[in-house]
Amino acid sequence: MHIVWLGKKTPFCGNVTYGREITNLLLDRGHRVTFIHFAQPEAAAEDQFGYEEVSLPFIFKSQILTIPTLGSAKLLAETLQKLKPDLVHASLILSPLDLKLPEICHSLGIPLVATFHPAFDRKRRNLSSSTQHFAYQVYAPRLANYDKVIVFSKIQRNLLTKLGVPAERIAVIPNGVEISRYAPGPSSIKQQLNARQLYVYQGRLAIEKNVESLLKGWKSAEMGSHNKLVIVGSGPLEASLKTFYSEDNIIWLGFVASEERRIEILRGADCFILPSLVEGLSLSLLEAMACGTACVATDAGADGEVLDQGAGVILSTQKVSSQMKTLLPLFREHPEITALLGQKARARVLERYTLSKNIILLEQLYDRLATPARSAYSMSQGA
């Protein structure tokens, strides 16, 4: 099957990881993939992984929003007409072009699938969650024009149906992890950092991630100099947070580009902590769970669904620092708790969130959409 993937390669975010993982697996399974993304023309080339690459011009691009040039929709239509793919899969990047895609694809008779990523908090308990909910309200009427919309959780599906997206248009296919790569294993990270216990946050340093509440809770818990909190990631709040939280037992590693290094950190950690105010379904959380690391996360987005029934500790998005002040000393004094939670986390990933199982679900969805379209095309050619 020939799939055109419309997604994101820069700047780095969960959408980038999602597109890379899925398209590489599709290639491995014998599909032809053309990756279309917003980039400067000279950046388009034969990709190192083997798929064709096409660039679209843009005016502005960030982790949250992309603004295309006026001619990008016409260029996309011409490209699709030339390629004649079996299906287009748009990993939505929050761009005005997202809203034009159904019209473009349907005029060419090409089935269109979307993955809808925006983070959310179903209870709208703060400004961040209210802002994200507005994105859902804006997009919902347009998502009804896609042939299928993929979301990562039942909670997200229920939110979209309440906003008017027909239930039959929505498919729940969660994020997945490559469980042979992200797995328990040896790690020397504790020795490198001279840590008795190691607690890890991995993600952007931005308001919606609520990292300062974690730092406040860590400071209040007085965990001692030999128990370390590692902050992996960068973002707009990095400089200010480092200024106010420069304790000896807080280690700022910044953005870690090496996947092997990130896996080594997760394997050696006693606990992974995600204090977000809004989330979708955190891939970093799933990666930590797959490595057999005990996990603590707020019930923002689908993360609570991931950790329910004992697979981890679920916090309220409210008063995270006070919850951490209570929880952290418990983990320090009873390491058997984190060991048990790590086992349960790995088991949950094996049960629900393996990349190999989820790619099969995706292929089945593709086939259901592409087969009727191919039949209709063959009939029109015969006529």
Image (cartoon, rainbow, N blue to C red):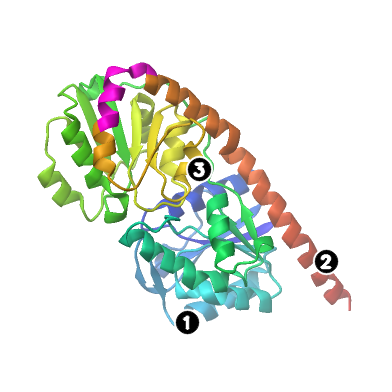
**Pointer 2 residue:** 375
Q: Please tell me whether residue 332 belongs to the stretch shown in magenta.
A: yes
The answer to whether marks 2 and 1 mark residues whose Cβ atoms lie closer than 8 Å is no
Q: Please tell me whether residue 69 belongs to the stretch shown in magenta.
A: no
Q: Amino acid at mark 1?
A: Gly
Which of discs 1 and 3 lies nearer the camera? The answer is 3
**Pointer 3 residue:** 305
Q: Amino acid at mark 3?
A: Glu
Q: Position of residue 155 (x, y in %)?
A: 53, 52
Real-space CA distance between mark 1 and mark 3, rounded to the nearest whole angstrom = 42 Å
Location of residue 5 by image quarter? bottom right
Mark 1 Cα-neighbour bin, 10 Å: few <14, some 14–19, many ≥20: few
Drawn side of residue 348 relative to residue 129, left or right: right
Q: Position of residue 20 (x, y in %)?
A: 49, 50
Location of residue 326 by image quarter? top left
Secondary structure of the residue carrying numbered label 1: loop
First along the sequence among labels 2 and 1: 1
Q: Amino acid at mark 2?
A: Ser
Real-space CA distance between mark 3 and mark 2, rounded to the nearest whole angstrom = 39 Å
Q: Position of residue 169 (x, y in %)?
A: 66, 63
Which of discs 2 and 1 lies nearer the camera? The answer is 2
Drawn side of residue 15 relative to residue 366, left or right: left
Q: In which quadrant of the rendered image does the C terminus lie?
A: bottom right
Q: Nearer the viewer, residue 356 or 129?
A: 129
Position of 373 relative to 257 (above/below): below
Q: In which quadrant of the rendered image does the N terminus lie?
A: bottom right
* Residue 90 seen in the current view: no
**Pointer 1 residue:** 71
Q: Nearer the viewer, residue 119 or 316?
A: 316
Magenta stretch: dominant secondary structure: helix
Secondary structure of the residue carrying numbered label 3: helix
Image: magenta residue range: 326-336
